[in-house]
Amino acid sequence: MPGIETPTPGIAPRLTEPRHTIAYILSLKGGMPSFNYREIEGIVSRGFKVHIFPTRITDGIYEPKPEWPLHRPSVVKAAVSVLYWMLRRPRTLFSALGEALSDHAMPEFGMACQYSREMRKSGVTLMHCHFADRKMFLTYFCGRLLDVPFTVTVHSHELVFYSGRKLFMRALDASSKIITVCDYNRNYLVNEVHIPQERIETIRLDVPLEDFMPENRLKVLTVAKFYDYKGYDILVSAARLMKEDPVVFWIVGDGPVDVRGMAGDLLASGKIRLLGSLSEEALKVIYQACDVFCLPSKTAPSGQKEGLPVSIMEAMAYSKPVVSTLHAGIPELVDSIVVPENDAKAIAEGIRSYMNDQALRKKDGERNRDKVVRMHGKENVEKLRKIFDSLA
């Protein structure tokens, strides 16, 4: 068979060229939807080549991989491409133009002129459109110009907001296969939109089950700016000493110290997770979800020190046990596990003490809450008020 090496007995055949080059038409507004990202990963891993043709592009959490060529919409390229198709397929071009004008889809028509030309150059043999909205109109026009088949995945919002459009029905009729994500949508397409049921298949969205499992590891939280006196080098070293322990380190913060660089291998393995800067509400959730708080503060080479870190007070207010250092004002607040500065092994052993003893975590957490209530209540603001009043 073309594209597959002659198999050796007992060894699965290996693809030497992609089965199809697929054009994925989707929106990258706010990055790529997580389910699109996982879907494309799975398709590529099964021997297909994918080109991304977005309707809009802004940054987000999920971005196309470098090996997924990304095409960008351009008004100039679209105008040039209209001339290109006028010379090659004038009748089809003007027919599509008439459809676009009658159903207010000129932006999709112009983008389709550009993208269909680029699809031809890229050797695209199949198109897939995720969402049957304006992205499907674009795909439909590309299909007319290229004579390339396309499939479409339909979600619920298109059935509500687009099913009355002429182009919605024309595009669905022109598609080679209609996919939807649940049986409710499938039944709606059959009963309300009157699509023959044999043309529709329910394919549910992929959930990476290996990633979405209950977290049985001890969750150790650090919340601090990425400054040298926060002791991130010690924290990373302690995490490295605990590579075989059932522990994960959550780090919230940002700053000049290259924590990502120093923790590269631990990030790759999932031992450390950098969560960036979080809103106050998100941070509250993280505080409550962690098991232990750790901040290995130390004196920086410049001589800079902590006073008494607010993040330790906040963690203790959530009844969390704390592992920290004999540094500056920290021992005034933390009674239990405080270890010498710059001692990654002692930090690791302190975390292990809590890892192996849930009752100790609960006991020290409750004691920490009581101490914060005693030392850091509203009476401190009242004391400040009295000073201000005395000087008025």
Image (tube, rainbow, N blue to C red):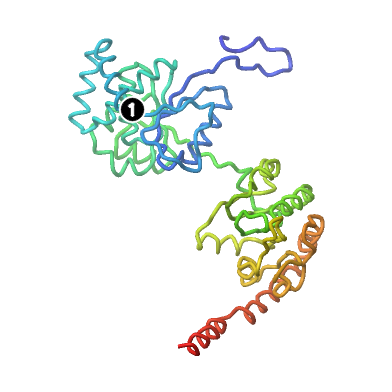
> What amino acid is labelled 1 in the image?
Ser
To which quarter of the image does residue 369 belong? Answer: bottom right
Q: Residue at x 82, y 55 (%)?
A: 345
Q: Look at the numbered disc 1 and give the secondary structure of its residue.
A: loop
Q: Residue at x 64, y 61 (%)?
A: 290
Name the one closer to the observer, 285 or 238: 238
**Quarter the N terminus occupies:** top right
Between 147 and 314, the one nearer to me in the picture = 314
Residue 100, image quadrant: top left
Image position of 254 with respect to 14: above or below? below
Q: Circle 1 sits on which residue?
A: 74
Q: Residue at x 45, y 88 (%)?
A: 392
Residue 238: % across, % down? 76, 53
Image spot of residue 134 (x, y percent): 31, 34
Q: Is residue 228 visible?
A: yes
Q: Taking 332 as reference, is 54 above or below it?
A: above
State the image coordinates of residue 320 (x, y, percent, origin top left): 67, 68
* Residue 13 placement: quadrant: top right
**Residue 41 relative to residue 173: left or right:** right
Which residue is more in the foreground, 284 or 323?
Answer: 323
Left or right: 121 with respect to 244? left
